[in-house]
Image (cartoon, rainbow, N blue to C red):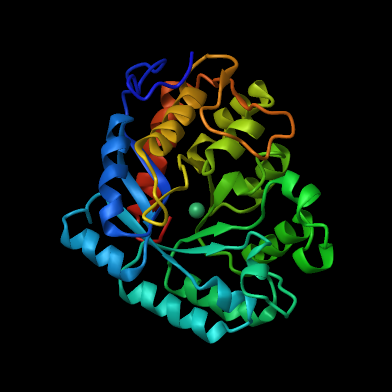
């Protein structure tokens, strides 16, 4: 079996729940319509969209406010340059413009985007007031803490500058220890689909922590390595995992195939029993390509929560648990 745009649901059974995509980037309001159109084909009816205030306003004016919860992207350059005042101002804006959450992104290469000349750590005292304000406003947080293990082997050799993955995760844990009321989604399976034992520990230690399945290729490559272990993880933690893709529209030209392949690949992965289906787009991070999809065949009860109920609970409770 292979992905086929003319038969977009190939290999999929009828789905008895709707899907909430808890992580997409909407860079322009016009670009949302193709995402909605393809999403609906795959059963996706609601989104958490990361969007600037003007894009959010246009989407709301166009009547899409009911199906999108918005995240405000905090200025990562202000983290790189140690300018907490700008971050605090942005959090105020997110609060006053009724965003559902704030987004933070700390893939180690962010330091290079802004030629940061100060050492970064997430738990640096200079950033503490920003987490305190997010906590005070009861604004949920969406955070990218670290990158795939393979990138630390291939790209981030300067450990002093980029920090090890373990160091980045420990900084993150200290922030959560210091701000116990923060409610958050640690995206990309808590940055650690490579190490489910560690994800379990974090979920056990931090009751307000959720994870998402953004980045289709990273999830399918790593979570697909040990099907039984991943199935067991889902059986145990399915109320803490949110379906997400990280699709990005309106930044560069994206066609229907880009959108459809991600939804198709994830649904085949979560729902089917298929084995060795070739991922329908390249995975540059796999040292032994191609990446294959091996379906997890998750139960209806798990899918109901993972596809919809967890997001509904997360986004519809106004910041409280
Ligand atoms: Zn993202």
155 shown above or below 275: below
Q: Which residue occupies 66% across, 64% down? A: 177
Q: Nearer the viewer, residue 227 or 203?
A: 227
Q: Which residue occupies 54% across, 20% down? A: 295
Q: Nearer the viewer, residue 134 or 188?
A: 188
Q: Give left or right: position of 33 versus 181.
A: left
Q: Give left or right: position of 77 versus 92.
A: right
Q: Which residue occupies 46% across, 74% down? A: 136
Point out residue 215 in the picture as x, y percentages from the top left corner. Answer: 54, 43
Point out residue 106 in the picture as x, y percentages from the top left corner. Answer: 62, 62
Task: Name the outermost residue toward the bottom.
Answer: 85
204 shown above or below 269: below
- In terms of image quadrants, where is residue 59? bottom left
84 shown above or below 203: below
Q: Give left or right: position of 283 versus 255.
A: right
Q: Which residue occupies 41% across, 42% down? A: 310
In which quadrant will I find the C terminus? bottom left
Point out residue 169 in the picture as x, y percentages from the top left corner. Answer: 71, 57
Point out residue 94 in the picture as x, y percentages from the top left corner. Answer: 38, 72
- In terms of image quadrants, where is residue 127? bottom right
| Number of marks | 0
Task: Name the outermost residue toward the front.
Answer: 253
Q: Nearer the viewer, residue 146 or 308?
A: 146
Q: Nearer the viewer, residue 107 or 71?
A: 107
């Amino acid at each position: 079996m292979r992905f086929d745009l003319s038969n977009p649901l190939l290999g999929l059974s009828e789905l008895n729940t709707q899907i909430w995509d808890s992580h997409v980037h909407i860079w322009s309001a016009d670009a949302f319509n193709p995402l909605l159109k393809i999403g609906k084909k795959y059963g996706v009816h609601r989104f958490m969209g990361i969007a600037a205030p003007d894009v959010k306003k246009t989407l709301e004016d166009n009547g899409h406010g009911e199906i999108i919860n918005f995240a405000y992207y905090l200025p990562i350059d202000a983290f790189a340059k140690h300018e907490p005042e700008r971050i605090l101002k942005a959090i105020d804006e997110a609060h006053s413009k009724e965003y559902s959450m704030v987004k933070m992104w700390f893939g180690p290469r962010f330091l290079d985007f802004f030629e940061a000349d100060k050492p970064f750590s997430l738990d640096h005292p200079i950033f503490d007031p920003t987490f305190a304000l997010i906590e005070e406003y009861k604004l949920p947080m969406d955070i990218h803490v670290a990158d795939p293990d393979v990138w630390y082997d291939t790209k981030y050799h300067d450990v002093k500058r980029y920090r090890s993955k373990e160091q980045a995760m420990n900084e993150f844990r200290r922030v959560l220890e210091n701000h116990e009321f923060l409610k958050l989604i640690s995206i990309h399976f808590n940055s650690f689909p490579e190490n489910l034992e560690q994800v379990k520990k974090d979920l056990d230690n931090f009751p307000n922590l959720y994870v998402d399945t953004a980045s289709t290729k990273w999830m399918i490559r790593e979570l697909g390595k040990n099907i039984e272990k991943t199935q067991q993880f889902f059986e145990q933690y399915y109320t803490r995992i949110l379906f997400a893709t990280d699709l990005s529209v309106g930044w560069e030209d994206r066609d229907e195939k880009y959108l459809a392949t991600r939804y198709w690949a994830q649904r085949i992965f979560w729902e089917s029993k298929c084995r060795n289906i070739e991922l329908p787009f390249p995975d540059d991070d796999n040292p032994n390509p191609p990446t294959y999809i091996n379906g997890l065949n998750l139960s209806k009860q798990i899918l109901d929560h993972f596809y919809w109920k967890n997001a509904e609970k997360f986004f519809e409770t106004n910041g409280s648990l």
